[in-house]
Image (tube, rainbow, N blue to C red):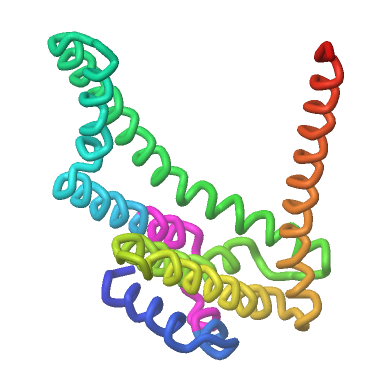
Amino acid sequence: MDLKATLAIWKNILSHPGEASFVEEEEKGDANLSTAVIWMIGAALFAFIIWALYIIIFDPVTQTLELMPEALLQSGMAPEAVDEMMAQAKSTFASTFYAMLILGLMSVPVFFLIGSGVLWIIARVLGGEGSYTEQTYLMAAYSAPLFILNTLFNMVPLLGPFLILAGNIYAVVLTYYALKVTHEFPSNKVMGTLVLPLTLILLFVCCSLLLMASTMGALLGQVPQ
């Protein structure tokens, strides 16, 4: 699929939220998993380029480390030792920063496919008959462009977090329609498909917090008074 056709699909889905736009894309018969993966990889590559340019222009590594020398000198460390330590710290920090960025962006298509798979399994349990390929394709049609937009929103001072939040909420709305069309679900089953994984995540977090609290309580109980 060429770039022009891809942008047309993205524009149709994002600018016309609702069942009609998803049905339109579904009826074209172009749904395939490779296209969905290519879209998500393309979005991740775009984000990588944007972040790489940001790092080159603003050099956040240097900005983060530039306050350290003064503190080290005040602690009594020799200037030569400070210079050597800062050179090593900058190299290590930069390597770690780039590695985390690359790994994070590589994980975008992987976690997208896993997330779509979780929703598909839940939908099938609830009686859905749509295919994983079709669902993933429809979800990628808005997830890829929204990922790109969220990357750009990250660069917006002050309003960035609010724009990203709005984009994520919009993604949930579009996921509702994608599931509804793919599995020909009534609204209650779509909501069940969306709410169940969120409920499981919430339960997992609560259980983890309770386990941590009980562990800390046991440890504190062993401390001599």
In the image, residue 80 lies at what x, y percent?
13, 10
**Residue lying at 71% horizontally and 74% vertically, measured from the top left:** 183
Say left or right for 109 vs 136.
Answer: left
Quarter of the image holding residue 59?
A: top left
**Residue lying at 14% horizontally and 13% vertically, measured from the top left:** 79
The front one of 209 and 82 is 82
Work out which quarter of the rendered image holds the C terminus and state it.
Answer: top right
Say left or right for 118 vs 2.
Answer: right
**Residue lying at 53% horizontally and 54% vertically, measured from the top left:** 112
Per the rendered image, the range of residues in magenta is 25-41
Residue 194 lies, with reference to residue 18, above or below; the image says: above
In the image, residue 153 lies at what x, y percent?
35, 66
Q: Is residue 29 magenta?
A: yes
The front one of 65 and 43 is 65
Q: Main secondary structure of the magenta part?
A: helix
Residue 184 lies, with reference to residue 130, above or below; the image says: below
In the image, residue 63 lies at what x, y percent?
22, 40
The front one of 108 and 166 is 166
Quarter of the image holding residue 10?
A: bottom left
Quarter of the image holding residue 8?
A: bottom left
Residue 126 lies, with reference to residue 7, above or below; the image says: above
How many numbered discs? 0
In the image, residue 42 lies at what x, y percent?
33, 57
Say left or right for 160 vs 33.
Answer: left
Say left or right for 52 vs 20.
Answer: left
Work out which quarter of the rendered image holds the N terminus and state it.
Answer: bottom left
Residue 134 lies, with reference to residue 29, above or below; the image says: above
